[in-house]
Image (tube, helix red, strand yellow):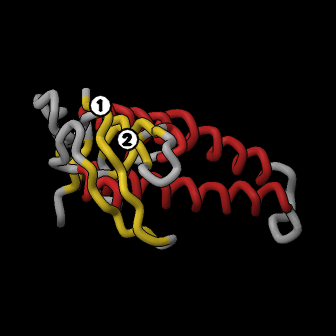
């Protein structure tokens, strides 16, 4: 089993999500199945089949998240003020477009680029780890090579 880094906040969120699924969502689905069974013939009972399908999806999600939790290793944010590291929030300048973007480097299970959380395992994340304030670095992406400059690290 490979260990996967995660921020302490991400670890708490993962535990909370599993707990909510197990204590709230699971009993709700069990109740839906029970209610649908009371409606009679299960062969043509779409509510029953929908609830059973939802139950299967929920159990698969709980299993997947539990596996992620077993593999997770909490890693504290980097303490260096001028070097990008795991947990750092970094402002980058795309040298071609002159647009800036801010990312926090996190584990793959908590990554959400639209929310500004970039996986340290992504191409940009890998290239960014260890980059210093003011440094420009290349990143090979599916759409071609990009160059970024580190504008700030916190």
Figure check: 127 above or below 132: below
Q: Position of residue 149 (x, y in %)?
A: 32, 45
Residue 11: in sight, yes or no?
yes
**Residue 120: image location, x then y, percent:** 28, 52
Nearer-the-camera pick, 126 or 16: 126
- The image quadrant that residue 78 belongs to is top left
- Foreground residue among 7 and 133: 133
Residue at 17% x, 57% y: name it: 3
Q: Closer to the N terminus: mark 1 or mark 2?
A: 2
Q: Position of residue 129 (x, y in %)?
A: 20, 50
Q: Nearer the viewer, residue 15 or 139?
A: 139
Which structural element holds mark 2? Answer: strand
Secondary structure category for the residue under label 1: strand
Q: Is residue 46 left or right of residue 91?
A: right
Quarter of the image where one finds residue 2: bottom left
Query: Residue 74, can we see it?
Result: no
- Report the residue at 44% width, 48% height from top: 94
Rendered image: mark on residue 152: 1
Please tell me which residue is depicted at 37% across the width and 41% down the height of the picture: 92
Q: Say which residue label 2 marks.
A: 92
């Amino acid at each position: 089993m490979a260990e996967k880094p995660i921020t302490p906040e991400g670890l708490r969120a993962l535990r909370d999500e599993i707990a909510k699924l197990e204590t709230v969502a699971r009993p709700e689905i069990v109740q839906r199945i029970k209610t649908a069974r009371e409606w009679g013939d299960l062969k043509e009972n779409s509510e029953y089949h929908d609830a059973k399908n939802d139950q299967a999806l929920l159990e698969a999600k709980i299993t997947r998240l539990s596996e992620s939790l077993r593999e997770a290793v909490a890693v504290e944010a980097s303490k260096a003020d001028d070097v990008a590291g795991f947990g750092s929030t970094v402002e980058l300048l795309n040298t071609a477009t002159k647009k800036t973007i801010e990312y926090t480097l996190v584990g793959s299970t908590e990554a959400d680029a639209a929310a500004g959380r970039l996986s340290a395992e992504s191409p940009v994340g890998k290239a960014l780890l260890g980059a210093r304030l003011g440094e420009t670095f290349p990143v090979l992406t599916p759409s071609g090579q990009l160059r970024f400059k580190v504008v700030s690290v916190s």
